[in-house]
Image (spheres, rainbow, N blue to C red):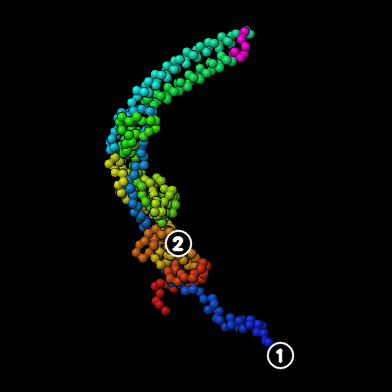
Amino acid sequence: MKKYKTRSITGNLFPLLALTLAIVPQSQADAAKRVTIEQALHYASDVIHILPCVVAAPETYRIASHASAELLQLLPVGSSVKKGQLVAKQDNVYLNQQLELIKTDIESARVAKAFAEDEYNKALMLSKKGLASSSELNKFKLQLDSTSLKMQRLQLEMQTAEIRNKRLNHYAPFDAQVTEVSSEPGAQLSEGQPILRLMSTQNKQLECKLPVLAYQNSVALKNHRFDFNGKPLKLREVSQKLDSTAENLTLYFDHPAKDRRDILVGYRQEVTMAVKADNITRVPYDAVELEGSNYRTWRVNEDGKVERLDVDVLDTVEAYYIVQSTIKPGDQLVVRGQQGLSAGQEVELISRDAPPP
């Protein structure tokens, strides 16, 4: 049978590839990606946010029974009261009787203590003469200590009863309005049972919603300027959680009105927030891309290479975003050709205003 010789082409493959690569022009292999750019612009004005707010009364006060006693009177819902005004009253007949009983027990305990002290002193004298044992002396000492402790306990009971007796009359701790009634005259109340609730007529605040997209951090918020009907406001607190929609933070301000009695709780008002910073610029719409929940843009550095930057969008003006970032006025931003870019990639710049080739 005739044998055929096989020829390997492996040895000739690499020279062929090398020759093919050598034919590709070097300029084509290193060609920079062409992108269209536009400059970031200066933004001198403050960024104004209108915050929707509502008047709220954070301080309410619940009045409850301090003892088991009948409720004699209370003010109805809607009643306006001054600080120190009587708003509810309970019967003190039983507490007065209890106080008299405690006083009687205290007097009885005082007599028992005097007797125990006299007996102890007699036993002590006999013990010094050797006529009484130490066990007998200890017995009289125990009786004396017991009567003394009983006196202390009864005195504390009397003080507690006196405090409860005083608190059967309930007074408003501040200027307020009755917003809720939990009982009625003639009811026998137990200790701790609620009677009514008061809402302060002076301690009112503004609770304002701030979109979480306009929030950087609490320190930045302290530097913003807040204004309410031409009056500057001082930010008091920032909520530690988002609202039910997970889109807004709540900012808290003391209401600037001197007399807040006529300001209705639940009334809707507005506060302006002015954001002023050196790192705010105006950038074209198409220079900013949304990736997930983050806004980003491509900037061309001095070496003709691109870098990826995060920006905080504060507002919109015509065809521009107002952003807070490290971008400076005059920086060149990519507005077309972003697809396929990678950080550090060299690019060929085409101005948006340049005529088409």
Is 121 displayed left or right of 293 in the figure?
A: right
Q: Residue at left 57%, top 83%?
A: 23
The answer to whether residue 330 is visible is no
Is 184 displayed left or right of 275 in the figure?
A: left
- Start and end of the magenta stretch? 131-137
Is 270 displayed left or right of 108 in the figure?
A: left
Whether residue 319 is in magenta: the answer is: no
Whether residue 135 is in magenta: the answer is: yes
Q: Which residue is at the front of the view, 168 or 191? A: 191
| Amino acid, disc 1 | Lys
Label whose residue precedes the other's in the sequence (1 or 2): 1
Q: Residue at left 44%, top 52%?
A: 217
Residue 3 disc label: 1
Q: Which residue is at the front of the view, 318 or 74? A: 74
Give the quadrant of the C terminus.
bottom left
Residue 292 disc label: 2
- Tell me residue 239's x, y (percent): 41, 48
Determine the image quadrant of residue 82.
top left
Q: Is residue 16 above or below residue 215?
A: below
- Tell me residue 238's x, y (percent): 41, 48
Q: Residue at left 68%, top 87%?
A: 6
Give the quadrant of the N terminus.
bottom right
